[in-house]
Every structure is written in C-alpha cells, then in structure tokens.
C-alpha cells in the first residue's frame, strides 16, 4: 500500500502571507504619505479642501500653497479668508510651523518648535444690526445646530503644549465692537520671542525674551450699547476655588519705535505715547502675592500726552452688582520694585480741561514737562512706603521751572522719612546734605507732633523764592515770599525731637536784609507756653522795611518809627516763667542792652527780676516822631526784686541818665533810685547840671485803699531860658513839700507847700511868699481845695471830681461859646455841684509875667456849677 507524503511548512506560508500583507500595508502607507508629501498631491488636497471649505462656510477662501514634511514642518502661503460682508477676516502671506508629529501621536504632546507669521491681517468686528461677531458664521457652519446641555467629564489628561520661538512680521489686527464700545487698530512690524515654559494646566509661563518693533496701537472707546441687566449681572459662571494663579516670568522685553493712541468718549479722555525705546528686564511678577519686581527699566526718546476733556453726564450702559464678584488679592498689600530706571529725553504733557488754568506757578492740571534725564535705582513702592536712590534727574516745565540736577537717597515710610546725600540744583537754588524725620505713625503726627524726631543737616544751601512759589504760589501773599527774585541762604544742623531740639548751628539770610545766626537748644514745642530755650544769638539783623513787611498791617502805631537797620546778639536761656537774657541790640538810632533774669514776669504779684537795662544814644525823637521835643538818650538802669504791683512789690531800682536831649537841651547825669518793701515806696532823684539842679526825696504808703504820698523837692536852680522853655531869662529857686494822706485825685486830702521861692525875670529878682494848697473833705460830704499865693487866692467847694473838671467847665461854656472840634456832652458824667471863688492880686509876681496889668488892682471871680445850670 502506498503511503501519502506529509505536508510540511504550512505555518510558514501563513507567516509569509502576514508579513507580505503588513509590508504591503506599510508600503501603501508610505506610498500614500509619499504622495501626500509631493507638491502635486498637496496642491490637489489644498484645492479640494479649499473648495469644501468655501462650500461649507459659503465665503471666499484661498490657500496659495500648503506644504508638510515628515519632520513636522508645515508651510502655508497666501491664505485669505473672507467674512460675509466680503471684507478680509484673516489673511497671511506666510505661515511656518515646525512641530513633531511623533510627539503628537505617541506622547500626547504638542511640541511647536517654531512659529513664523508674515504679512498677516485679522479683522474682528461686531456691528449693528445683528451685533454678532463677523466669524460667527464659521462657528455656526461647524456647529451641530443644537445646544448640548449634557454635562460630560473629561477624565483624560490634557495634551502638553510646548512652544519654542515665535516670529511675527508685518501684522495688522483690527477689532471693532459696538456692543462693548471698543475700536482697536493695531499694526506690528516685528515681534519675536522664545517661550521656555508654557504650562496651561498650572498657568505657568516663562518667556526669556520679547522683542517688539514698530507696534502702533490705536484704541477708541465709545459709549457701549445697553445690555440686558440680567445678562450683565449673571454670576452663574464663577472661577473654581482651586484655579491656579497665573505665574508669569519674563526675562527681557524690548519695544522700539512704537506708539499707543487712546481716545475715550465715555471717560472724556485722550492719551498718546510715542515710544522711541523701551527696555524692561523684570525679575519677578508674582500675581498671587501682588509683588512686581520690574528689574531694570529703560525709556528713551518718548513723548506722552494725556488730556482729560470736559465731561458730560453719560449714563452707564450696565450697572453691575459687585457683591459676589471675586477680586484678586482684595486687601493685600502690593509691592512694586525695580532695580533701576533710566529715563532720557522723555516729554510728558497733561491737561485737565475740567480745571481752570492756574494764574501762577506750576499748574498740576496743565503740565508740560521735558525730562532730560531721570536715573533711579533700588526703587520700592508699597501701601505704606516709597523709596529710591536718585542718581541723576533733570527737567524743564512750561511754568519756567528748571531742575538742573537732583541726587538723593529718599524714603517715605509709615514711621520715618529721609533725604540722604541730597543735592538739588536749579538756576537759583542749590540744596545739599541730609534731612530725616522719625515718628510713631502718620496718625501720631496729628496729635503728638512734639515727639517727631528731626535730624537735619543743611550745608551752605540757597533757595530761590521763585522756585518755592512755583509749587505753592499762594505763599506770594506772605511777606517773606513777596520778592520772587530773592534768594535765601540756609545753613544748619538741627537734631532731636520737636519738644527737645538741639541747634548746633542755624543761619538764614536772604529775607531782604534779614539775617539769622543762632545755636543752642529749644524744648517744650509746639506749646509756646511750655517753650524753654537756651540760644546763643550770634546775629539777628533786619531792617525797617523787612520788619514792616513781616508785621500784620496796622500792628505798629503810626506815631512810632522803627530803626532803618538793627542787629541783635547775645543769649537767651529759660522760659517765660524763668528767663535769663544777655542781649545787645545795635541800631542806626542807638543801642540797647538788656541783661538779667526774670521769673513769672507776666504775673505782677509773683514776678521775680534782676535786670540791667542800658541805652546808648537811643534817638527817641526819631522813634517817637517828635525830634523837636526829644533827642538821643544814654542811660543805665537796674531793677531787682519781686513783683511790680505797687501794693505788693518788694525790690529796688536805680539808674543814671547820663545824657538826655529834651526840648533841644541835653540833660546830664540825672540819678534815679527807688525801693519798695512792705507796701512802702521810696524814691530819690537828683541832677547837678549848670542849668538845672534839684534833689527829690519822696515816699508812698500803699497799705491803704488810697495811697499816701510825701515828698520833698529842693530846687537849687532851674534856668528856663537855657532849658529852652522861655525866650527870656527866667530862673527859679525854691522848696516844694507835699503831704497827702489820701492821694486819690478825685478825693484828695493833704497839703502842698512851695516856699523859699526866688524868681529871676531878666534883671529883676522877685522873692515870693509861700504858696500853699490844701485839700480835704467837707462835713457835708463834698470836698474842698484851697490855694494861697502872691498872685491868686482860690477856693473850690462842693461835689466834684478833679478828673472831670475840664468837661464840666466846657459843658457850661458851650451854650454861649461853641468851640469847634469839642464834644461837651459826656454820658458818663457824674453829678456835680460846687462853687469856685477866686481873687487875682496884681502884685510884683504877676507883673513880672504880665506887665500890661498896671491899671488893675485885683480881679474877683465867683461862680457856681451844678449839673442843671451854667455860670
């Protein structure tokens, strides 16, 4: 029987078939891919896709060329997409994208190594009447037409996106939206960047460098359309609580030859900026913590204009309830920092048409300034502080103010402020050195300025008044600022707190001819009643003109003339309660020296004093504006004691008037001395002059209700002609004694006696009898006054007041002889009723004075006065 042979290798055939099939498929794929990568096939696909897309969206679509390589390079040329109004929606000359297909397919990663876009235009609009975006038709064409309300959860991991370099050239973007009222027209010549990190999941982006050239942006904001409040207030979409915070890291941004133009008819605002060169190298942009460290900033050749137009009442389009609106970092402190800021040739103009133009000074509502240079480093700004190091600054403003140079390290914080290494220079101002203050808080300055710490060191600086008026023109009304061309010279070193200041030196000049140069300490400020001083006055000098300009109008009596110039030196130590003075004032009208101590000088009963006062040729005639009566006085005077109320004073005073010109005669060596103790006052005075020689000794008892006075005056000689009192020779010698137990003029009691009188009239010598005056009280309740002399015997009795006697007599004369310029009626006139009897004797004494009375032997007068009748 024949055996059938066994078939071998069947499984090998199966393998060969599978392998051939797989290879065939791969070959087919490679052939297809190869065909796709060929320009003819790609052109075919492009034309078919363009036709399909035109049919789908029913607008014109053009793609000049599409080229794709296996390596991931995609090139698209001459793209054109038209909107329904037959205007350009998007067009581009060239699009070049370099990406990895392998990473997309196998690693779920979009790695765009580079992107380049040239000659592109995009126009987005939302216009009336439908107020839909002009690309909405594309969304509708590819949409399902029904709204899917089913909520789905994507559990797959998002695709990782990487972006390398981006290069944009010659772009234009137009956006016009009548709904929001925004109109944007942007053109860009060049933009390039390289993205290091692009993490959408964590919102982390890091861009090492951005370069922008000729970015020109025009923004117009108009009144938006009224939006349904229900839509505007829709808060159904809220950010997730765990949404990542944007982390943005930018290494370097360079913007050149660019501009921004913004117009808002809603906010009535216009702004324009033409940027020559802007270079920013930020270090940290931390949105979560509101920390913005901009690193280095450079801005050159830039012009900026901001104008606030006159506002009209515009109703807002939408009123939005912000109760539940999430605010980023609400209440969190913001910090803005930069390592350096370099501004050069930057012009800034600001106009607020709602504010009137200022008549003088720098108008902060209408600024026009040119910044020559402004270089700042280590800048920090937060909610409670600002500080920086200014290495150089210069600017000019249309008001005429010019800052030539500024250097300083400054800080303003919640508890201190300082200007260190300050140097500020204008054409008329130069300020140098340091100024620092410290305080517990800003609020504490309002209630406790005494604890404000001061450390000021101003070195030989000068301040032009015009520069001060530039910033505070209202000060022009103050006398110190009246002359804008004046220059103040300031040099000082002041330390300590306001209530305890140490003045190492302080000199001020330039307020006209006024000069100040002092040193020492001041304590107790700002309460002037508690102020204590220990000041060495090296020089305080001024002039009449300066003093009058500083003093309030009308504060100086019109009959007083100040010296044309004066100079004060010396020392003041203590307070109004306890003061030591050693001062000397030199003037063109004489000198005054005051030296000594005082305590409680404002209290007449408790005052304690030990003073020395002297004058040297002090021109009283010029000061009192009566040089025909008064002249220079040179004197020295001392006073020591307690109190200056006559009833309680206890002390002594003495002095010498070395020279006094009165009535064109110079009196010399008049001595004065007075003491007060236990309500008893004594006084002595005397002079031994060739033309006047007398000695006075007087006492007063102040223990009674009305003082009691006694005095003895011995007149050796008084030569009236030589003293310029009479044209003819008249000499008097005599003794005057007075004893008045009651020295109240209106209730006078006592006696006055003039005896041993000798009168020389020309060549005639007349010896006079004793003259007596008696005053006292009547039993009827009135008073009497009697005079006995060689010339006159008179008696006054009744109810009267000697201080009102002149008005009483005038009132009686007025009905018969009205004297112009007098007013005899006195509403406060006390009742009176008195009789006056007088006899005039024509004797030798009277004839010596009135020689024409030869025919009259005597003259009698009898008169009665009361408040109901005349005489």
Image (spheres, rainbow, N blue to C red):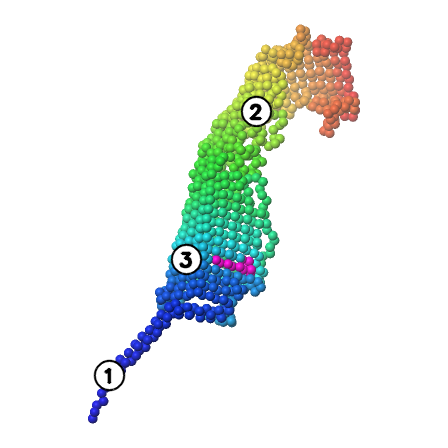
Given residues 567 and 805, the one toward you in this image is 567
**Along the polypeptide, which appears first: circle 2 or circle 3?**
3
The residue to which callout 2 is attached is 563
Which residue is at a point 39% across and 57% down the rendered structure image? 194
- 262 sits left or right of 35 in the view: right
The residue drawn where x is 70% and y is 11% is 849
Q: Which mark is residue 167?
A: 3
Disc 1 secondary structure class: loop
Local crowd at mark 3 within 10 Å, few (<14), some, or many (≥20)? some
Residue located farthest toward the front when viewing the structure as drawn? 40
Residue 613 lies within the magenta run = no
Front label number (1 vs 2): 1
Q: Is residue 174 visible?
A: yes
Q: Which residue is depicted at the point 27% across and 82% down?
A: 10
Do the CB atoms of the residues marked 1 and 2 lie less than 8 Å apart?
A: no
Return the x and y of residue 369 as percentages of the image width and height: 51, 43
Taking depth in this image into account, of 307 and 860 the one nearest to the observer is 307
Q: Is residue 760 above or below residue 79?
A: above
Q: Main secondary structure of the magenta part?
A: strand
Q: Which of marks 3 and 1 is in front?
A: 3
Q: Which quarter of the picture shows residue 15?
A: bottom left
Region rendered in magenta: 172-182
User: Residue 726: where, in percent of width, then height?
Assistant: 66, 13
- In this picture, residue 290 sits left or right of residue 816: left
Mark 1 vs 2, N-terminal side: 1
């Amino acid at each position: 029987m024949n055996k059938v042979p066994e078939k071998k290798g069947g499984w090998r055939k199966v393998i060969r078939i599978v392998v051939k099939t797989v290879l065939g498929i791969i070959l087919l794929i490679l052939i297809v891919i190869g065909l796709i990568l060929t320009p003819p096939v790609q052109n075919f696909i492009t034309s078919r896709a363009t036709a399909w897309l035109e049919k789908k969206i029913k607008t014109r679509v053009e793609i000049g060329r599409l080229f794709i390589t296996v390596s991931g390079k995609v090139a698209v040329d001459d793209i054109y997409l038209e909107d329904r109004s037959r205007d350009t929606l998007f067009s581009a000359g060239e699009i070049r994208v370099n990406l990895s297909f392998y990473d997309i397919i196998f690693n779920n990663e979009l790695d765009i190594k580079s992107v380049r876009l040239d000659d592109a235009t995009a126009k987005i609009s939302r216009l009336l009447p439908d107020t839909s975006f002009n690309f909405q038709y594309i969304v509708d064409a590819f949409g399902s037409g029904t709204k899917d309300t089913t909520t789905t959860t994507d559990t797959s991991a998002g695709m990782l996106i990487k972006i390398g370099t981006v290069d944009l050239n010659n772009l234009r973007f137009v956006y016009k939206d009548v709904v929001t009222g925004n109109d944007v027209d942007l053109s860009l010549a060049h933009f390039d960047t390289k993205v290091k990190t692009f993490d959408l999941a964590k919102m982390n982006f890091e861009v090492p460098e951005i370069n922008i050239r000729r970015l020109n942006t025009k923004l117009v904001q108009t009144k938006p359309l009224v939006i349904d409040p229900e839509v505007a207030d829709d808060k159904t979409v809220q950010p997730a609580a765990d949404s990542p915070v944007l982390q943005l890291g930018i290494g370097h941004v360079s913007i050149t030859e660019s501009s921004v133009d913004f117009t808002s008819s809603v906010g009535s605002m216009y702004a324009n900026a033409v940027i020559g060169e802007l270079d920013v190298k930020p270090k940290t942009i931390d949105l979560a913590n509101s920390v913005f460290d901009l690193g280095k900033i450079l801005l050159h050749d830039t012009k900026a204009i901001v104008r606030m137009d006159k506002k009209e009442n515009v109703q807002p389009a939408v009123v939005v309830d912000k109760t539940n609106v999430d605010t980023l970092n609400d209440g969190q402190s913001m910090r803005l920092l930069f390592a350096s800021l370099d501004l050069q040739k930057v012009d800034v103009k600001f106009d607020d048409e709602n504010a009137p133009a200022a008549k003088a000074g720098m108008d902060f509502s209408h600024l026009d300034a040119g910044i020559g240079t402004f270089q700042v480093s280590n800048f920090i700004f937060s909610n409670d502080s600002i500080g920086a190091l200014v290495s150089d600054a210069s600017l000019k403003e249309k008001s005429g103010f010019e800052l030539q140079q500024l250097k300083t390290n400054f800080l303003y914080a919640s508890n201190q402020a300082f200007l260190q290494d300050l140097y500020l220079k204008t054409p008329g101002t130069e300020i140098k050195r340091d100024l620092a203050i410290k305080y517990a808080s800003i609020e504490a300055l309002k209630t406790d300025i005494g604890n404000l710490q001061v450390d000021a060191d101003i070195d030989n600086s000068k301040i032009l008044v015009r520069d001060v008026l530039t910033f505070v023109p209202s000060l022009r009304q103050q006398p110190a600022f009246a002359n804008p061309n004046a220059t103040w010279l300031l040099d000082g070193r002041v330390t300590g707190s306001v209530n305890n200041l140490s003045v190492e030196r302080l000199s001020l000049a330039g307020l006209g001819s006024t000069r100040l140069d002092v040193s020492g300490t001041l304590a107790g400020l700002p309460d002037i009643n508690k102020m204590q001083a220990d000041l060495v006055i090296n020089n305080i000098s001024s002039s009449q003109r300066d003093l009058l300009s500083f003093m309030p109008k009308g504060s100086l009596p019109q009959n007083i003339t100040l010296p044309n110039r004066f100079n004060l030196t010396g020392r003041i130590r203590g307070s109004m309660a306890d003061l030591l003075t050693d001062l000397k004032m030199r003037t063109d009208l004489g000198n005054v020296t005051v030296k000594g101590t005082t305590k409680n000088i404002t209290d007449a009963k408790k005052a304690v004093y030990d003073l020395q006062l002297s004058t040297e040729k002090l021109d009283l005639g010029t000061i009192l504006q009566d040089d025909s009566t008064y002249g220079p006085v040179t004197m020295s005077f001392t006073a020591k004691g307690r109190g200056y109320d006559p009833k309680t004073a206890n002390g002594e005073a003495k002095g010498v008037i070395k020279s006094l010109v009165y009535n064109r005669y110079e009196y010399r060596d008049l001595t004065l001395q007075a003491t007060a103790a236990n309500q008893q006052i004594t006084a002595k005075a005397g002079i031994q002059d060739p033309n006047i020689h007398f000695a006075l000794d007087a006492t007063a008892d102040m223990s009674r209700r009305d003082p009691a006075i006694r005095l003895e005056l011995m007149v050796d000689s008084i030569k009236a002609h030589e003293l310029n009192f009479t044209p003819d020779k008249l000499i008097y010698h005599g003794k005057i004694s007075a004893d008045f137990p009651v020295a109240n003029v209106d209730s006078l009691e006592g006696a006055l006696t003039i005896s041993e009188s000798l009168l020389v009239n020309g060549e005639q010598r007349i010896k006079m009898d004793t003259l007596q005056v008696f005053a006292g009280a009547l039993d009827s309740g009135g008073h009497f006054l009697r005079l006995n002399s060689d010339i006159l015997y008179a008696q006054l009795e009744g109810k009267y007041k000697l201080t009102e006697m002149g008005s009483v007599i005038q009132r009686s004369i007025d009905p018969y002889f009205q004297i112009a310029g007098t007013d005899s009626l006195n509403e406060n006139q006390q009742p009176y009723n008195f009789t006056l009897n007088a006899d005039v004797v024509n004797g030798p004494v009277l004839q010596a004075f009135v020689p024409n009375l030869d025919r009259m032997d005597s003259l009698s007068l009898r008169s009665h006065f009361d408040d109901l009748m005349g005489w």
